[in-house]
Image (cartoon, grey):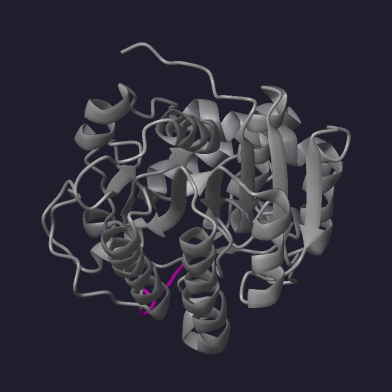
Amino acid sequence: MSYKPLDSSKVYLITGAAGFIGYYMSKKLLEQGCVVVGVDNVNDYYDVKLKHARLEQLQPFDKFTFIKGDISDKPMIDSVFEEYKPNIVVNLAAQAGVRYSIENPDVYIQSNIIGFYNILEACRYHPVEHLIYASSSSVYGANKKVPFEETDFVDTPVSLYASTKKSNELMAHTYSHLYKIPATGLRFFTVYGPMGRPDMAYFGFTDKYFAGEPIKIFNNGDFDHDLYRDFTYIDDIVEGIERLIGKPPVDAVPHKVFNIGNNNPEKLMTFINTLERTLTKALGREVQFEKVYEPIKPGDVPATYASTDLLQEAVGFKPKTSIEEGLQQFADWYVEYYKKK
C-alpha cells in the first residue's frame, strides 16, 4: 500500500506534547515541515526535567508553538481552537499509569474524562478533519482470549485508568454519531524507547540498577505463568499514527478503533534479560539486576497481546521493531542522558 507524506499546509494540534508519545509525534510532524501546536500542563507525575528536555528539542523548529495548559481547562482549549484552527487533532494528553490510578483517582477523571470531553466539544464547534486520540490496551481488562481484537468485549476494566480509556472510546463514538466528527481511537500496547516514561517498568528497572537497589517483579516468581506484554517501540507507534492521520473514518458513524501493538508478546523475564544484555553492551561491563519476586498488583493483567490485522488492512503497516533493537536504543540513550559509565 503506497504511503503519502503528510500535508504540511495543515495545522496539527498535539495535546500532551511534552509527553513521551506526544514529543515523538510532534518531532516527526515538524521534521516534515508541518505546523504543530503543542499543549501540555507539564505536570510532575514523573521527572519534569525529562519533559523540559523533550520540549527543548522541539523549540528550534520555527513551526512549533507551545502552550502550557491543561486540557481540563475548557476556556483554554476553546481559545486554542479559536486561534489556531487545527485541521488535525492528536489527543495524547492523559493521566497515565494503572497503579497510580488506585491512589489518585481524581486526576484521572479530571484529565481523561473532563479533558477529553473538552477536546470533543472543541472539535464539535470548530470542525476538524480528523481527531486521533489515545486509548489503551488496558481496556481489554482481564480478557483471556488472545490476541486481543478490536471487536472483543471490553466491559470488564480492572483499573480506573482502563475505565477512563474505555469511556473515551464511548464518548468519541457518541460525538462522531451526533456531530460527524471523524475520530480514531488507538489502543496502545506497552510503549517503550529512549526518552520514555520513567514510571514504566523497563525505565524503573534501569534506575534501580544504577541506584544499587533490587528490582521488584510482580509474578510471584512463577516463570510458568509469567506476565506477558506486547512491548511496542515508540517509532512504530508514531508511524502507525502518521499513516492513520490521512485516513479519517468515512462510515455512517465516522469512528474507528485500532490496536497498535507489536503482535508478538514477550515474557516479562525475557524482556528483563534483554534489558540486562543491552545495558551490558551500552556500558561495556556486565549488568545483572538483583531481583525480588512479589505477588501481582491489583489492576495488573497477566497478558497483553495485540491483533494488528485491522491496522494492517487500513494502512498497510504493522509494528516490527524487536525488543533487542528497541531496548538497545533505550539503553544507549539512558547511559548517555544520565551520564552513566
Q: Is residue 61 above or below residue 51?
A: above
Percent across and percent down for residue 309 are 20, 33
Quadrant of the image occupied by residue 159: bottom left
Magenta region, residue range: 293-298
Query: Is residue 259 shown left or right of residue 125?
Result: left
Q: Is residue 118 left or right of residue 315?
A: right
Tell me what residue is drawn at x 71 percent, y 65 percent: 79
The main secondary structure of the magenta stretch is: loop
User: Residue at the spot x=17%, y=48% of the render?
Assistant: 149
Instruction: Report which quarter residue 170 is drawn in.
Output: bottom left
Q: Residue at x 71, y 70 (%)?
A: 76
Front residue (pair 218, 142): 142
Q: Please tell me how many numbered marks the rendered image carries.
A: 0
Percent x, y of residue 264: 29, 36
Q: Please identify the quadrant where the N terminus is shown.
A: top left
Say which quadrant the C terminus sits in. top right
Q: Residue at x 11, y 55 (%)?
A: 145
Residue 106 in picture, x, y percent from top left: 55, 88
Task: Find out whether residue 197 is within the magenta segment.
Answer: no
Can the viewer see residue 302? no
Q: Is residue 296 magenta?
A: yes
Q: Nearer the viewer, residue 121 or 165?
A: 121
* Residue 166 at least partly seen: yes
In this picture, residue 203 sits left or right of residue 136: right
User: Horizontal and vertical percent for residue 142?
Assistant: 21, 68
Answer above or below: position of 70 versus 63. below
